[in-house]
Amino acid sequence: MGPPTNDLSANSQWIFPIHALHRTPSVATSARTIGKELYDRARGVEFLFRLGSSLGLPSSAMFTAATWFHRFFMRFSMEDYHRQDVAAACIFLATKTEECGRKLRDVARVCQSKITGIDVSQIEVESVASMEVEQQQTAILLAEEVLLEALCFDFVITSPHVVLVDMFDTSQQSTRVQDYAWSLAHDSYRTPLCILFSPRVVAAACFILAQRAADGPHSPSLGARISACPPSASLPTPPSHKPGSPDASRFPIEYFGFNESELQDLADALSILLEFYSAQDVQSTSYVAPLTSIVPPVHSARPRLYEPFPQFLPQVSAVVNSSSLTPASSHGNTSPSITPSQAPAAKTIPEVQKKTRRLDLS
């Protein structure tokens, strides 16, 4: 199977230039920095994934909801709409468009459970919690109304995971590389890659970074893997006069036939992913360390977007049992920094039948 002949999102209104992140409504109307906004976006998507997993939604619905979440905050400020309300509204709307319907009250109950740490089975029998569920339902409906306006009723989403499956079928990569790429694609939604680049660029970036992580530090660099010409292009044709086997490390470049502009996008996508992982608290997420040691492509010369996440953690004034809480809930609870692939394993995409696994590079 060859590469996709069209890319529905490549030329849509939903692909923003990277510099647009520096003038989002949240940044332009408040003292919030781009680093803080990206941290809060990661927390919002983490909440969204946990909410979707608890509701038993398929991965496709959660990926759609996460994309809408990023689109929403390109048009509205986080100062005006809380990320948890928007995340819940995105999930609720996705259950309708992805044909995996859930009742509003069920979404509100699970949302309230994540915020308060109360088991969802106990919320209905507690009058105070039940009242809070009613308020949560209202908040979701109000956020959904604004979400529909922000999306312009454009619900079509193409996931990089679907592109990855075609790549896996064509390249016959090892299970190790496939698992890495799948997890990286899942984590990519914690970054704004889905609104900066087309699905095939994001898929290619995840595939290349997975290959580099699996091949080890002595393998070709990311720069070599995404160069316009393979290193051996100037060598003579083999005596057999048959073309040599394509370099496996350059499979995505050959597969898609990226032009110069797309190669620059690919370099930027790779560097943003590596920035995201480098921003984590590596001491508490040791499995991320191998990724943070990978050198970004030299093709990317843009300003750095991410700041270290630990600096944004709120001060903990009391010991809180946060085992069942979502990071920094609106009720004042705190929990550890967002880290890649912390959300429970998501449901499989029916047409893809691939598992979303925790990224473990140790």
Image (cartoon, grey):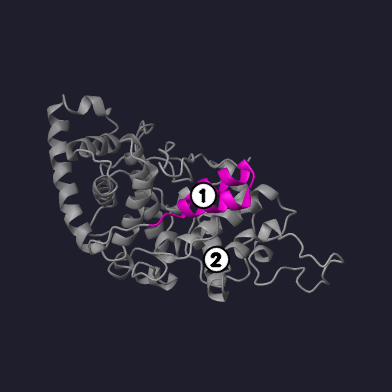
Q: Find out whether residue 171 is within the magenta segment.
A: yes
Judge left or right: residue 90 versus residue 1: left
* Mark identifier at residue 266: 2
The crowd level at tag 1 (other Cα within 10 Å; few <14, some 14-19, many 20+) is: some
Question: Where is mark 1, residue-wise?
Answer: 165
Residue farthest to the right, as pictured: 239
Residue 239 placement: quadrant: bottom right
Residue 274 shows up from this direction: no
Residue 294 in the image: state x and y as whole percent. 64, 56
Question: Which of marks 1 and 2 precedes in the sequence?
Answer: 1
Quadrant where the C terminus is found in the figure: top right
Judge left or right: residue 161 versus residue 57: right
Q: Residue at x 52, y 72 (%)?
A: 302
Name the one closer to the observer, 294 or 10: 10
Label 1 is placed on what type of residue?
A: Val
Q: Residue at x 24, y 41 (%)?
A: 101
How many discs appear?
2
Q: Residue at x 46, y 48 (%)?
A: 186
Q: Which residues are magenta?
A: 158-185
Label 2 is placed on what type of residue?
A: Leu
Residue 280 in the image: state x and y as whole percent. 51, 50
Relative to 229, residue 135 above or below: above
Q: Find out whether residue 111 is within the magenta segment.
A: no
Residue 226 placement: quadrant: bottom right
Quadrant where the N terminus is found in the figure: bottom right
Predominant secondary structure, magenta span: helix
Element at badge 1? Answer: helix
Q: Nearer the viewer, mark 2 or mark 1?
A: 1
Judge left or right: residue 203 versus residue 109: right
The crowd level at tag 2 (other Cα within 10 Å; few <14, some 14-19, many 20+) is: many
Gap between marks 2 and 1, in whole Å? 19 Å
Residue 85 in the image: state x and y as whole percent. 24, 49
